[in-house]
């Protein structure tokens, strides 16, 4: 295993992927894919749903890179259109790696209306691997951002996926339930974590996949100290229980990462208000203690959770690690 501290808001400390140094273009819709072939794809999980994805294929570059597909999984209530997943997807494609950025049942309004059950996400990743195989890819890296890191870790810990040759996580929480509970405590959320757990437990007891009494609830001061809409959260009891409840072991990467046997890179932000400073090392040491000898932890020291002003640094770190894997 190894650890390394990356640069801050600039580019120092960010290794390149073996190609000549270049300045990344600022992202711009319609202009950041000139050297990339883009195509919409459809994921069809075994339970009958359909999700969309965007397949990016570099037009030029190292042939070894072009055979390694990176599947990007979004964070909470996110998708591939904005933020870190979109930037990283396009920047890795510019560096020569094919990328498939996917939505899952947790994207958009899934957690709000009952369909976003975390423990069902392995079906979505299986569907993504089917699309990868259909497009000729036999070597795949799963890349998860924030909650997506937990989705990918849970999948690899509990599913056979021989084509997956690596796990790359960005802003990876050691435990989704613990991170949420601490955040709600910090801001004085109402209802409290314990109150929601008490409400949810009997509702999901009969059928956690489709509880007849499930309903939407809101939490005030979930993301900040003021009782304003932007600081609130919306869930259903079933979706909250599945990904943030106290009995959601699949949402605790600390308990799952020891079962992952492929090479792992953990890229953390050094100034992350959602993740405790020691969580990256916790994941690293757990994986190494379980016998995984190929685990890397990198910290971008001044970055926040969304890597404001330095997504290019984390993209460079990811690109360098992928180049060694290709």
Image (cartoon, grey):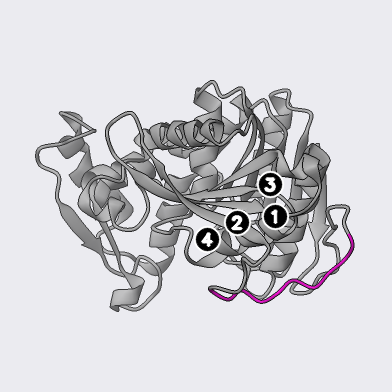
Viewer-side residue, 23 vs 36:
36
Q: Which residue is identified by label 2?
A: 37
- Pair 4/2: label in front: 2
Residue 141 drawn at (x, y percent): 64, 39
Q: Label 4, label 1: how many angstroms apart (C-alpha)?
A: 37 Å
Find the magenta span and give its range: 20-29
Decide: few, some or many residues near mark 3? Use Cα within 10 Å; few <14, some 14-19, many ≥20.
Answer: many
Residue at which label 1 appears: 59
Residue at the image point whose x is 23% and y is 33% from the top: 209
Quadrant in the picture for the C terminus: top right
Around disc 2, counting alpha carbons within 10 Å, would you say few (fewer than 14), some (14 to 19), or many (20 or more)?
few
Whether residues under marks 4 and 1 lie with C-beta atoms below 8 angstroms apart, the answer is no
N-terminal-most mark, 2 or 1: 2
Point out the frontmost of discs 4 and 1: 1
Tell me how far mark 2 sits from mark 1, CA to CA. Answer: 7 Å
Q: Is residue 103 visible?
A: no
Q: In the rendered view, would you say 130 is above or below 109?
A: above
Check contact, mark 4 vs mark 3: CB within 8 A. Answer: no
The residue beneath circle 3 is: 266
- Answer with left or right where residue 78 lies relative to residue 326: left
When the figure is inspected, residue 279 is found, relative to residue 162, above or below; the finding is below
**Label 1: how many residues lie within 10 Å, few (<14), some (14-19) or many (20+)?**
some
């Amino acid at each position: 295993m190894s650890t390394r501290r990356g640069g801050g808001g600039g580019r120092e400390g960010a290794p390149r992927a073996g190609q000549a140094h270049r300045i990344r273009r600022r992202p711009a819709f319609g202009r950041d894919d000139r050297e990339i072939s883009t195509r919409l794809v459809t994921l069809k999980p075994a339970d009958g749903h359909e999700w969309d994805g965007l397949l990016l294929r570099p037009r030029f570059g190292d042939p070894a890179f072009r055979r390694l597909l990176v599947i990007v999984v979004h964070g909470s209530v996110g998708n591939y259109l904005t933020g870190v997943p979109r930037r990283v997807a396009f920047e890795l494609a510019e560096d020569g790696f094919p990328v498939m950025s996917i939505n899952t049942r947790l994207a958009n309004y899934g957690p709000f209306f009952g369909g976003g059950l975390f423990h069902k996400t392995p079906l979505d990743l299986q569907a993504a691997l089917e699309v990868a195989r259909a497009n000729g890819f036999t070597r795949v890296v799963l890349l998860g951002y924030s909650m997506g890191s937990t989705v990918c870790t849970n999948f690899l810990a509990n599913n056979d996926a021989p084509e997956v040759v690596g796990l790359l996580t960005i802003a990876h929480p050691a435990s989704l339930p613990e991170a949420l509970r601490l955040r709600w405590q910090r801001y004085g959320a109402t209802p409290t974590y314990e109150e929601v757990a008490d409400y949810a437990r009997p509702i999901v007891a009969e059928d956690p996949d489709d509880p007849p009494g499930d309903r939407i609830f809101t939490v005030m001061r979930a993301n900040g100290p003021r009782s304003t809409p932007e600081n609130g959260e919306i869930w259903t009891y079933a979706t909250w229980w599945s990904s943030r409840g106290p009995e959601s072991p699949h949402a605790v990467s600390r308990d799952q990462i020891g079962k992952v046997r492929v090479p792992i890179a953990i890229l953390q932000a050094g100034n992350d208000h959602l993740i405790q400073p020691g969580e990256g090392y916790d994941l690293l040491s757990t994986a190494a203690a379980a016998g995984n000898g190929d685990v890397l932890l990198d910290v971008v020291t001044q970055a926040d959770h969304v890597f404001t002003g330095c997504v290019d640094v984390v993209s460079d770190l990811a690109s360098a690690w992928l180049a060694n894997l290709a």
